[in-house]
Amino acid sequence: MSGIVRAASRPGLVALMAALAVAWGCASGPAADFGASPPAGSLFLYPERIPLGDGTYTEAERGILFVPANRSNPASGVLAIEIYRFRAAPGADPATPPIFRLYGGPNFPGLEAWLDPEYYDTQIRPYREVADFVVVGQRGIGSSKPNTVCEPPRPVALDATLEERADALRDAAERCRSFWAERGLDLKGLNVLEAAADVNDVRRALGYDRIQLWGGSFGSHWAMAVMRVYPETVVRAVLRGLEGPDHTYDMPSGVLEGLAGIAAAADTATALAGHIPPAGLMATYKEIIHRLEQQPVTVTVETEETGGPVTVTVDADAVRAVALFGGAAGWPRHVLAMHKGDFTTAARALVRDRLRPGYQTASYFMLDCGSGISPERDARLRSDPAIRYVGDLGWWYRTNCAVWDSDLGDDFRRNFDTDIPTVLVHGDWDTSTPLANALELAPHFRNSRLVIVRGGSHGALIEAMEASPEFHQAILHFFTTGDMSRLPDEVVLPPVRWAVP
């Protein structure tokens, strides 16, 4: 690779990143001259010292790799992708290919934001016992540069219609898209195929012939793109919370199945005995939806956003939104409170959504909207009867993606077959990437083991490794040898510590 630079101290990187900030973030206007950029392939690494919980330190190499902003446009310039490399611990077999960790979202802020001693001990140290561990940043997001932040949508009235909310989203998308396009960023390069090429460029820059992949959620989607385009470079993979080529938009029926599993466990939980109505938690939840479809309720709450009491109308949509946050342990308590007429949580969520809406980066929208949805899946989603209970999960994407013009096409969204040894881990209570995703994809991974984590959420791999030392060792054994024989078909998590009403 050209232009490789290795620095002995952090200040050099600080100066380099300052130059990037001038180039990307401090330009005075659309016609600003960004100045000369390092050539694509330039790698800058420096040593990072990380404090541990016992008062000692560990080391990593941290830095950036400059990659083409859009490989199909030679004039597009470069982006900076942040990299961490943790060298394998003494005693690891040096012949074991490195493990490349691909994070989800796409909204990875960069490892520094999470890298405390506990995170290191649980999320990094075990893999260093096997091989080098490499974290690859996400183009256009977080600690990679530019971080393509958007201004949030303007607040809307508490009683805003769906179309008024959609107008606010589209306006925010248009403003963000215009901002970055006017400053010279080739937005077309912010897609998962380019992100897969980033991984391949990192592999080559760090001197590896072949790698292993560990990806969860969007990271699994990203890893599949690497496996599809660069199969000869991937020795094996572990994928969690699977998001296949056509799974960016969640299917309502899959989400409802996850909720039904949580509800069934809550129905028999000792901690909730006497609290669950005779019909069961899921029937109770559906009854609340039916009731508010006919007659919304008026609720007065105090919120941080309003600085005092405010009265809002809670409808079925507000209740559906509550179903998708709070985690398995807390959701039953929300349902039981609403069953008794307490809609405080839903009301506060509604106020927060209207007055302090969160938003993502331009790269997030280009990546996810680029992956998109096939016409067949879109038709199934729109007609899915589970929309009544979890909402139209395609509405938010459809509203925003109309602005970004980034679709990769239906050929990209077709499932592909692979013989790369792969462990697929999925929780049956995952309401972010439903288990149905894994069941659809598993036959296409012709040399794989699907491990279902009973009671597992979106973080099922970590949950299973923490709950089962045998599974923990089996995963590390797979990363070391490729042997899947020690892996079970399922891992059953310990009983949930339910939030009691």
Image (cartoon, rainbow, N blue to C red):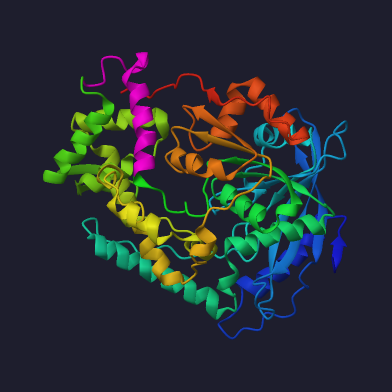
Q: In the displayed image of the protein, which residue is found farthest to the bottom? A: 31
Quick one: 93 or 234, which is closer to the camera? 234
**Residue 181 showing in the rendered view:** yes
Quick one: 135 or 480, which is closer to the camera? 480
- Whether residue 394 sits left or right of residue 110 in the image: it is left
Q: Which residues are magenta?
A: 253-277
**Residue 361 showing in the rendered view:** no
Vertical comparison of 19 with 378: above or below: below
Quick one: 67 or 304, which is closer to the camera? 67
Does the magenta segment cover residue 255? yes
Q: Residue at x 58, y 27 (%)?
A: 464
- Whether residue 137 sits left or right of residue 314 in the image: it is right
- Counting every numbered tag in the picture gives 0
Vertical comparison of 182 with 80: above or below: below
Residue 209: x and y, percent?
82, 52
Residue 425: x and y, percent?
57, 35
- Whether residue 269 sits left or right of residue 218 in the image: it is left
In the rendered image, which quarter is residue 374 located in? bottom left
The quadrant in which the N terminus is found is bottom right
Q: Residue at x 55, y 50 (%)?
A: 218
The quadrant in which the C terminus is found is top left
Does the magenta segment cover residue 49? no
Q: Main secondary structure of the magenta part?
A: helix
Q: Residue at x 51, y 40 (%)?
A: 438
